Image: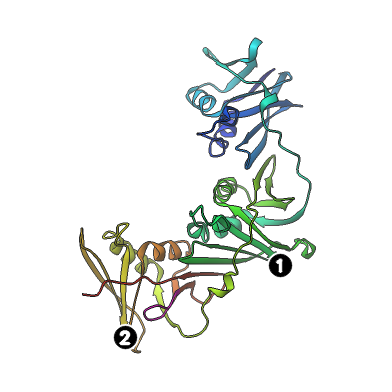
Amino acid sequence: MNFQISRNKFLDGIQKTLGIVEKKTTLTVLNNILIKTEPDQIKIVATDSEISLVSYYDAKIINNGMITVPARIIFEMVREIEGDVIEFQVMENNLVNVTCDKVIYKIPGTSADDFPKIMDVEDGKSMRLECKTFKQIIEKTFFAISTDEMRPNLNGVFLKVKDDNVTAVATDGHRLSIVTKPLSEDHSKDNDIEGIIIPRKGVSEIKKFIEDGEYINTYVDEGVFVVSKKDTTLRVSLIDADYPDYSKVIPGEGGTEIQLDNNQILHSLRRMSVMSSDKYNGVQMNIYDNKLELTSTNPDIGEAKDEIDISYSGDLIETGYNVRYLIDAMDPIGDKVISFEVRSENGPGVIKSAGKNDYMCVIMPVKMRKD
């Protein structure tokens, strides 16, 4: 096996695999990436058995073959090389030579026979999305994914497609985030998806995958969610579980809506979060006489207070929330004005973009200490 390839192109291809390859595993081959020659290009494959990335890169093929090499080591080698073109050659006993100008690296490779087989994708139910749309979906749901391994059905983003819209939901039991976005005009209504759960790590890799590019094609095929663009395909094994009925968490009537300047409330909440710790993470909110009063108290650190002018003339509303949850919910909105629907004491808060219904975050209140 022997090929020549652009150093920058090779480095980019290897770097994209680093989030997938297993760092701690009893199966050593999962620390490796598979490199295989194809006509006028090479294929790079990484997998942790649950997530797989397959990419193709133009190269000058001298001799055909395939090999697996440690992903982290080959990345560090190529990163430190300063030349333009790299030659990759497999010698006897799977010894790999990586050369560029006067630089020569020699590392042991492993036979590709031991590498997990990645099945070709059979087109299943599909949808086409703008990368920026999918990125917004992830940014507005990822923070609410549960990390409780005892509740695996909450360890990912629930995704469903109906008619011309895709809806994504995430919850950890303390907060729930839901986003609805329109699909591209060429989406087929015959490809509606009743509901799938994409695991946390898979969502994280999808976010990296869509950082550049305009559109992606996605497929759901026998327990696998597939995302593809140009010459790269990402496959994510889905969580096989039933997602809870999230509609029961969304409150009905009974809330009081106040509108807040996005930038102003985020800065105020971040000032409150200075006092936050694992034990003391709440912010007290008192709403009365056209003002929102915020207080954060931590006996181990101190106290912070702030006040924001708002339009409100009703009865006093006293409530409290985890300050980090509020920041997480408001930060990805992006619009200038936020709608915050509050309820006294034990009622949940609802955060939206003012005048829009494509995003909602429901946050359960916390009991605040009374002096």
Q: Secondary structure at mark 1?
A: loop
Q: Give 89 or 171, whichever is nearer the viewer.
A: 171
Residue under the image location 74 percent in, 39 percent down? 119
Q: Earlier in the sequence, mark 1 or mark 2?
A: 1
- Left or right: residue 350 versus residue 122 is left
**Residue 97 percent across, percent down from the top left:** 59, 15
The residue identified by callout 2 is 316
Which quarter of the figure has residue 371? bottom left
Q: Is residue 91 visible?
A: no
Asked whether, in this view, residue 33 is left or right of residue 186, the answer is left
**Disc number placed over residue 164 in the picture, else none:** 1
Give me the residue at 74% from left, 20% from top: 64
Position of residue 270 measured from the top left corner of the image (x, y, whole percent): 32, 61
In the displayed orientation, state which residue is furthest to the front. 150
Q: Quadrant of the N terminus?
A: top right
Neighbour class for label 2 at 10 Å: few (<14), some, many (≥20)?
few
Highlighted range, magenta: 342-349
Quarter of the view holding residue 30? top right
Residue under the point 40% across and 66% down: 326
x and y percentages locating residue 45 in the rendered image: 65, 33
